[in-house]
Amino acid sequence: MELYPRQYLYLRTVRAKLFIDENFGSNIDLNKIADEACFSKFHFARLFRSIYGSTPHQYLTHVRIERSKEYLADGQTVAFVCYKVGFDSLSSFTGLFKRRTGLTPRQYQIDRLNFKEAVAEKPLHHIPGCFAEKKGWKSK
Amino acid sequence: MITKMNHLSIFVLDQESAFDFYVNKLGFKVNTDAEMGPGKRWLTVNPPDQPDLEITLMLIDDGMMFDKDSSAKMRELVKAGTFGFGVFQCDDLKATYEELKAKGVEFSKPPTEEFYGYEALFKDDSGNWFSLGQKK
């Protein structure tokens, strides 16, 4: 089997994916990406989906939600995170976040901050005892 | 009866650099990052679709786990690319290969057809090698 029957198209699609990874916080025009990749919008979306299992738009939303989790876990405000990851409105961000994760952004943040606090306070509760012992951390 | 693995360790030369490699290049998620004293850190990451598998990025340092001589030998062995710690899987090897290469990941074997599927080999920032596969 030929490994690279459509290598050029693969490279353009991978580049588009990397562009989304790096520019998710901006107002990305997915039609423009298709234009730059020299594809029709339909062809681009179909190839993207065959590689990544979702359309470019679905993938962009996925990246935005995943990155928002990181910012929330760092303690940034929900409003700051919403705009930082490229959403236009707080209500659409909150609604989408809840549909994806089952929690509101604030609930998610509280969970993550509580976890971090618990790790900081009692790290040995989160480390298998054998490793803690081998590292000499258990006796401290 | 053993049911699953939930922790495994990868020995690394520098945890900050390993954090960058596994999180920013491979796209793994940080699970636990705990300060354990000056220069001591417990750092685990998850492959994106395996939140219950914690990969410990274990620093090779002098201490109870390795005496000074053993840690020096271990560092040399890791740097030399002695250890292969496992096989990662992806849905589309060609695309993942191109993506990781663009991010600076070093491959010692490009995507190649094998009887069980497709395989490529890459190294982490310390020198540990991994297989990256796609099933047929």
Image (cartoon, coloured by chain):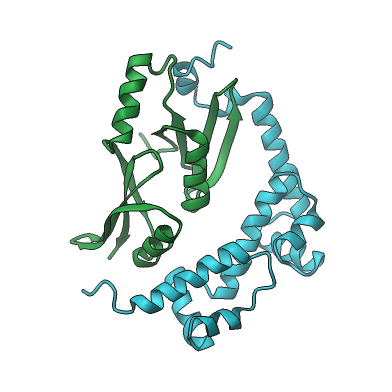
Chain colours: A cyan, B green
Query: What residue is drawn where x is 33% and y is 18%?
Result: B70
- Of residue A62 and residue B71, the one placed in the foreground of this image is B71
Q: Is residue A127 above or below residue A8?
A: above
Q: Is residue A27 above or below residue B102?
A: below
Query: What residue is drawn where x is 63% and y is 65%?
Result: A24
Residue furthest left in the image: B115
- Is residue B122 rendered to the left or right of residue A42? left
Residue A139, percent across and down?
Answer: 55, 10
Q: Quadrant of the C terminus of chain A?
A: top right
Query: What residue is drawn where x is 50% and y is 89%?
Result: A40
Residue B100, percent across and down?
Answer: 42, 58
Residue A72, percent across and down?
Answer: 72, 49
Residue B133: image quadrant is bottom left
Residue A4: image quadrant is bottom left
The reply to whether residue A9 is visible in this rendering is yes
Q: Is residue A34 above or below residue A138?
A: below
- Is residue A121 rendered to the left or right of residue B6? right
The mark total stands at 0
Q: Quadrant of the N terminus of chain A?
A: bottom left
- Is residue A86 rendered to the left or right of residue B34? right
- Is residue A99 rendered to the left or right of residue A1? right
The reply to whether residue A53 is visible in this rendering is no
Residue B31, percent across and down?
Answer: 56, 40
